[in-house]
Amino acid sequence: MIGAQLIGSAFLATWLSASLRLAGPVLLAALGETFAEQSGVLNVGIEGTILLGALASFLGSYYTGMVWISLLAAVLIGIIANIFLAWMYVTLRASQVVAGLVFNVLALGIASAVYRRAMGNSAVPESIAMFHPVHMRFLSNLPLIGPAIFGQTILFYLTLLLAFVGHFILYRTNFGLALRASGENPAAADSAGISVYRMRYAGTLISGAAAGMAGGYLVLAQVGLFRESIVSGQGFIALGIVIFGRWNPLKAAVAAMVFGACDALQLSLQIFGTHVPPQLLLALPYVVTILAISGLFGGKAVQPAALMSPYVKD
Amino acid sequence: MLITSILFLANGASPWQAYFALFHEPFSTLRGFGYALVRASPLALIALGTIVSWRSGFMYLGFEGCFVIGAAATGWLALLTAPGSHIGPLPFFLFLPLAISVAFAAAGAWAGLVGLVRARLGGNEVLISLMSNYVAIFILQYLVSGPMRAPGSLPETPLLPRATWLPFILRGTRAHAGILIALGAAGLVWMLLEKMPLGYEMIVTGFNPFAARYAGIDVGRRLVLAGFLAGGLGGLAGMVEVLGSQHRLMDGISGGVGFVGIIVALLARLNPLAVIPTAFLYGGMSVGADAMQRRVSIPSSITFILESLAVLLVLACDALRYYKVNLSVLRRSSPRAVVEQVSK
């Protein structure tokens, strides 16, 4: 009986802690994507941007050994890559889905070519400097929730903070209002004196910076090395989280935790050796997202009205 | 070409040498030619699926999933006909049509469902189809690590019975009959879109759903049909890959082919007849890139860069010249909006 309880609480503790750990990078990417989509740009290219950010931070950490500089490198690469994407989306008015998808392939090519070039063909993964989990004297020792909530890396807390900051900017500042107006009714925004192009560039660049940082998060706080498959669809999951979170940063944070919990549940169940097929649990977040965006629950109405339609100034 | 030459130089190899390696292997050796055909067949089929759906205004991106579903359905059927199992061996001329219809129907239903969601509920097919890829991949993972797993350490099915393999068509190469299926499909898609009233209606639906609705075309039904056909073609790609080159099911069988197929379709400017040469060129380049990696040690991922830059340049040029058929303009209105517009 006591044994079962022990296993139960150990299970809960690892599950909680893994949920939050896995939620971090996707949440960061989703926060940025929220800004892009609110401005009217569906930035599918964040998948590739995360990969480039991961590579930049890996190389940064490998050569300099300083985690903050590597994170900065990831953010910068994300912004640079998305200047190009924004130019495609906004200035050239190319189809956002096509440009984003193709960019993902381009990013994969660039990342693996650069990685090979920098590392040679050595198969041994190099160890790099990483962020370490913080340890708060009393809080981290609390039973059950201690290690989960108070034992994450500093990046996790930074991401949570950014969710609140993002929410504030989006709904409480003039900039946020202008951004949302550009996504909702660009013609009206334009006649009110807002530069729709500038707002959409801003939205795309913010999503680029966040996606680059998410890549840095993956490498510097979770994996500690670079692989071409490191992102494996997390950018697309972030797109799902944005919808699931109804284009709202705080709700996106909750959505990301739900995704993280499903993902972590599968890990924990494997550790404890149950017979539920893990793929069922892995597929769960995607099925939930599909249901959420299928329009069954009126998801269509909340979407920024001008999402995916390029704006032509008359 | 110029940009890639610079890339080659940056990697410390002469561009001429690299281009030679890139094109020599696939286009002047028989073995390389065969491999190029093997890589081209599923790409061409997926590209054809892309053309059918995108020209009908249905931005389907779930070919990775359709490929997997088609492959799984084929593998299941082929294992059923293994000697000593339920049905027993079938003659190949019976098995092949059966496999084609099962793969087509399974993947077609998978994608048609997304079409139904778009037509009836107004959900966004771009994101739904992206998500459905992962669901399909997990279904395959489950199948090969659970019910269909062969005894052994790797999560994969047993080797499919020899009698179900697609015949090899060129002596001394791995080229199989899949490319013939792709050729046939290209002809049929061309017929459908260019010569038949139904295809014309689908294209009109894509260009202008309002006008289509006004002309009495059932827009929703055309969307579901577009999804079904596109998914079916993606499923055939999976079938060709399983019966033609892998001969078993395993995790990670798709490996991004669903997205590369879309790129092939874009490079072919959504023209069904241009798909075959484009897919062959791409298949050849990916074979050549492997050769290049061996010879002048340039990473083979450079083909990704080459291909995607080509598409992006095409996109940019179109936009700069202002005459393109802008896909995103086609997408601006959902069928529900059409109905609203008409009823006003």
Image (spheres, coloured by chain):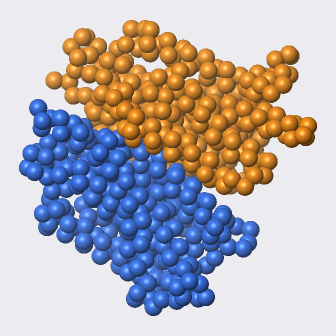
Chain colours: A orange, B blue
Q: Which residue: 37% across, 18% down?
A: A179
Q: Quadrant of residue B124?
A: top left
> In this orientation, which residue lies closer to the viewer: B33 or A150?
A150
Q: Residue furthest left?
A: B215
Is residue B43 shown above or below A116? below
Q: Which residue: 56% across, 15% down?
A: A164
Q: Residue furthest front?
A: A1
Is residue B290 toward the left or the right of residue B223 in the image? right
Q: Is residue B151 visible?
A: yes
Q: Which residue: 24% across, 71% down?
A: B188
Is residue A91 shown above or below B325? above
Question: Residue B314 location, x and y as percent?
Answer: 30, 48
Q: Is residue A56 visible?
A: no
Question: Residue B57 location, x and y as percent?
Answer: 25, 49
Question: Residue B76 location, x and y as percent?
Answer: 53, 73
Is residue A217 toward the left or the right of residue B75 in the image? right
Question: Residue B15 location, x and y as percent?
Answer: 47, 57
Q: Quadrant of residue B33?
A: bottom left
> In this orientation, which residue lies closer to the viewer: B290 or A191?
A191
Q: Quadrant of residue A26?
A: top right
